Image: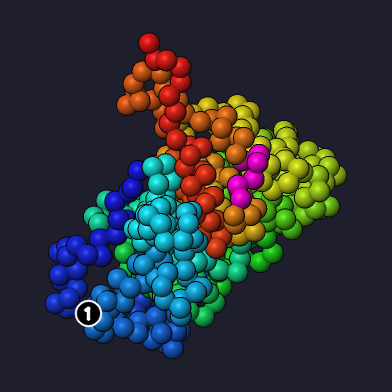
């Protein structure tokens, strides 16, 4: 299944026609518009951010080039660059080949040049950015194609690219009714990839977002105006995001997830669930409950709490300490990060947990050593084929426990495949992160299979 290109860069709309006729000059927000505590770009930073906005044609060319690198179709570019000796860093992983010079080798090169399976297969689609900044832009535009105003999000969350904990916590803002995807910025300037994604998404704010088009988590550069969210240690940042969630959603959460502040690989699966459910993420240390987390729990003492991760990440002592504040506490865990993600995917307790133990679901596959990619990909778990985050800890080989799980939920049919359930897997990261061979294996595991004679 190959989705439509998630951006209208090549389609001239009334908006883009108008922009070409009269290049947009950013309007400097007034102090009243910005509100207290909002930090817009300084004149020098704004000059960097707006460089290139004075000329419509160069800007359009830059948008096409950058977005081509960001969006999923980047794999096609990689496929055609295999003979360029100066592009070794971006060369695609080799497709299976036969003997040198034979026809099977030629066929493999042809499919590689077409982007198969680096871009997409029957049952997988790759968000192929080289880092979380690019993957976040690609995922946001896959979920919000933004070819019309109705397809655009009302707001976008900006998080510092170094703040994995803040990014995971911000995933809750992707849940309805806010539905704000996360993009990454830096302290000093907005990355070009993020700026182009923001231009395409064009958030305008709404009553649900408090009229804010952007939520700025901590110290990040941003264009225009944004609602600031204070940041600090992981527990402090998460508590502030949880407060913002309560104000915007207008009610208490149904559940609270406690994740590890010191083991991001165990915390990663929480982002997908938070984006799907609207349950906030709070942080605990390995052997202690931070004061900011304790205060946040006290505000919702009757809300069930689920601790994600084994005792090596969050000790039993911490769980007991949470139990003194919250009426109900349970642990969901696996012995390692890969198994831990599977545990949450399978888990079910009332309305908490994915409970994905049968065919007909979406999945997201990312590397366990890239926590920011879990935040970048969270919108994929809260739209389309909604589904949990699965982790792989090796670029070339799918973990055996993930293979077994995908076999457990593999779809099948007896007589009519058009009436069957289907699985789809988003693969997050370039071929250095998750190889083409691993993607092809995942595709096979997700493929609909015929069961029995069908008589």
Q: Which residues are magenta?
A: 397-402
- Residue at (48% x, 57% y) in the render: 99
In front of the other: 215 or 402: 402
Identified at 53% across, 30% down, the residue is: 409
Along the line of sight, which residue is nearer the eye, 270 or 423?
423
Secondary structure under tag 1 reads helix
- The front one of 365 and 264 is 365
**Residue at the outermost top position:** 455
Task: Please provide percent x and percent y for residue 269.
Answer: 61, 47
- Is there any visible trace of residue 306 in the rendered image? no
Q: Is residue 47 magenta?
A: no
Left or right of 75 on screen, residue 19: left
| Foreground of the two, 249 or 261 | 261
Quadrant where the N terminus lies?
top left
**Would residue 399 be counted in the magenta stretch?**
yes
427 over 198 or under it: above or below: above
Q: Which residue is mark 1?
A: 56
The colour mode here is rainbow
Q: Quadrant of residue 47?
A: bottom left
The answer to whether residue 288 of the structure is visible from this angle is yes
Q: Quadrant of the C terminus?
A: top left
Q: Which of the 4 quarters of the picture holds residue 334?
A: top right
User: Residue 137 vs residue 166: left or right?
Assistant: left
The reply, left or right, for residue 87 in relation to residue 53 is right
Going 52% across and 66% down the picture, which residue do you hit? 131
Q: How many marks?
A: 1
Q: Position of residue 104 (x, y in %)?
A: 40, 53
Residue 326 position in % (x across, y down): 73, 38
């Amino acid at each position: 299944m190959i989705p439509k290109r998630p951006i209208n860069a090549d389609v001239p709309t009334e908006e883009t026609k108008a922009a070409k006729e009269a290049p947009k000059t950013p309007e400097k927000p007034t102090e009243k518009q910005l509100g207290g505590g909002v930090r817009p770009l300084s004149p020098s930073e704004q000059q960097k951010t707006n460089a290139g906005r004075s000329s419509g044609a160069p800007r359009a060319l830059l948008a096409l080039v950058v977005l081509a690198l960001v969006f999923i179709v980047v794999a096609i570019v990689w496929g055609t660059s295999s003979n360029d000796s100066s592009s070794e860093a971006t060369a695609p992983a080799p497709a299976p080949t036969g003997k040198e010079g034979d026809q099977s080798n030629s066929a493999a090169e042809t499919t590689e040049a077409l982007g198969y399976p680096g871009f997409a297969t029957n049952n997988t689609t790759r968000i192929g950015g080289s880092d979380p900044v690019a993957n976040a832009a690609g995922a946001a535009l896959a979920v919000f194609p933004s070819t019309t105003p109705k397809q655009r999000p009302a707001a976008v969350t900006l998080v510092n690219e170094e703040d994995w904990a803040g990014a995971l916590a911000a995933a809750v803002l992707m849940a309805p009714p806010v539905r704000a995807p996360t993009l990454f910025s830096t302290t000093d300037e907005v990355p070009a990839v993020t700026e182009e994604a923001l231009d395409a998404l064009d958030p305008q704010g709404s009553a649900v977002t408090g009229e804010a088009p952007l939520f700025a988590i901590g110290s990040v550069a941003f264009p225009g105006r944004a609602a600031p969210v204070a940041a600090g240690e992981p527990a402090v940042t998460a508590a502030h995001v949880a407060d913002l969630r309560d104000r915007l959603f207008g009610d208490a959460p149904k559940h609270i997830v406690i994740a590890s502040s010191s083991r991001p690989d165990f915390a990663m699966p929480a982002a997908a669930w938070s984006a799907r459910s609207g349950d906030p993420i709070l942080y605990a240390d390995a052997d202690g409950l931070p004061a900011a987390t304790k205060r946040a729990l006290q505000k919702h003492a009757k809300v069930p709490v689920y601790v994600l991760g084994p005792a090596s990440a969050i000790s039993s002592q911490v769980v007991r300490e949470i139990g003194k504040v919250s009426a109900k506490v349970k642990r969901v865990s696996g012995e390692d990060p890969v198994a831990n993600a599977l545990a949450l995917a399978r888990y079910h307790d009332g309305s908490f947990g994915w409970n994905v133990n049968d065919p007909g679901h979406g999945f997201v596959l990312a590397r366990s050593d890239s926590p920011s990619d879990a935040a970048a990909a969270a919108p994929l778990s809260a739209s389309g084929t909604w589904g949990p985050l699965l982790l792989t800890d090796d670029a070339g080989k799918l973990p055996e426990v993930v293979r077994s799980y995908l076999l457990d939920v593999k779809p099948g049919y007896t007589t009519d495949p058009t009436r069957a359930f289907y699985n789809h897997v988003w693969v997050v990261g370039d071929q250095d992160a998750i190889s083409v061979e691993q993607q092809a294996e995942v595709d096979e595991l997700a493929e609909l299979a015929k069961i029995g004679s069908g008589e």
